[in-house]
Structures are given as structure tokens and as C-alpha cells.
Amino acid sequence: MLAQHSLRPLDGPIAVRPACPNCGRSMYLKRTCKAADGLAELRTFACGECGVYVTEAAGD
Ligand SMILES: [Zn+2]
């Protein structure tokens, strides 16, 4: 697979902000973990209201 997009630092636009599973508000990006061989980039989102954290794997 060729890289189809470049990784951006935290000041880049966030394409998808998941809703908090607890309160439904938009979560903010807490941290990212760069993709490694065979592993997708991981993004951890946090809810500022209730402190819930959600980690998602970006891409396929
Ligand atoms: Zn919440």
C-alpha cells in the first residue's frame, strides 16, 4: 500500500471528531500514535465534559 496521505501534527485539521459515548458531545484529539509496520495510526480522543477517553485506529 502506498501512503495516500501525510501525517499531520496536532495543529492540522481534525477530520473526524467522535461523539462521547457517555454524553454525546464532540470529543477532542488528545494524542496520536504514529502508524508502524502493520499497525494503523492510533488516535486517542477525550471528552472535556466527563473525561472519557476513546482510542480509534485510523485508516484501514
Ligand atoms: Zn462526555
Image (spheres, rainbow, N blue to C red):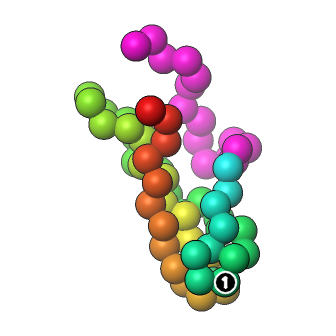
Pinpoint residue 56: horizontal percent, then vertical percent: 46, 54
Whether residue 4 appears in magenta in the rendering, the answer is yes
Asked if residue 21 is among those painted magenta in the image, a careful observer would answer: no
Q: Quadrant of residue 9?
A: top right
Give me the residue at 69% from left, 76% from top. Answer: 24
In the rendered image, the quadrant that contains the C terminus is top left
Q: Residue at x 58, y 23 (%)?
A: 5
Which residue is outermost to the top? Answer: 2
Question: On the rendered structure, is 42 left or right of 14?
Answer: left
Q: Which residues are magenta?
A: 1-15
- Above-or-below relation of 51 to 6: below
What secondary structure do most residues of the magenta stretch adopt? loop
Using the image, determine if residue 56 lies above or below residue 2: below
Residue 33 in the image: x percent, y percent? 40, 48
Nearest the eye: 28 or 16: 16
Rate crowding at label 1 as few (under 14), some (14 to 19) or many (20 or more) other CA atoms within 10 Å.
few
Taking the spot 38% from the left edge, 38% from the top edge, the residue there is 40
- In the displayed structure, 36 sits above or below 17; it is above
From the image, which quarter does the N terminus lie in?
top left
Is ligand 1 closer than 8 angstroms to the Cβ of mark 1? yes
Residue placed furthest toward the bottom: 50
Q: Secondary structure at mark 1?
A: loop
Q: Position of residue 12 (x, y in %)?
A: 69, 42
Q: Would residue 16 appear left or right of 45 to someone viewing this image?
A: right
Kindly identify which residue carries mark 1. 23
The vertical placement of 19 against 17, above or below, is: below
Q: Residue at x 56, y 71 (%)?
A: 46
Residue that sits furthest to the left in the current view? 37
Give the image quadrant in which the ligand numbered 1 is located.
Answer: bottom right
The part of the image, by quadrant, that contains residue 15 is top right
Number of marks in the image? 1
> Which residue type does callout 1 highlight?
Cys
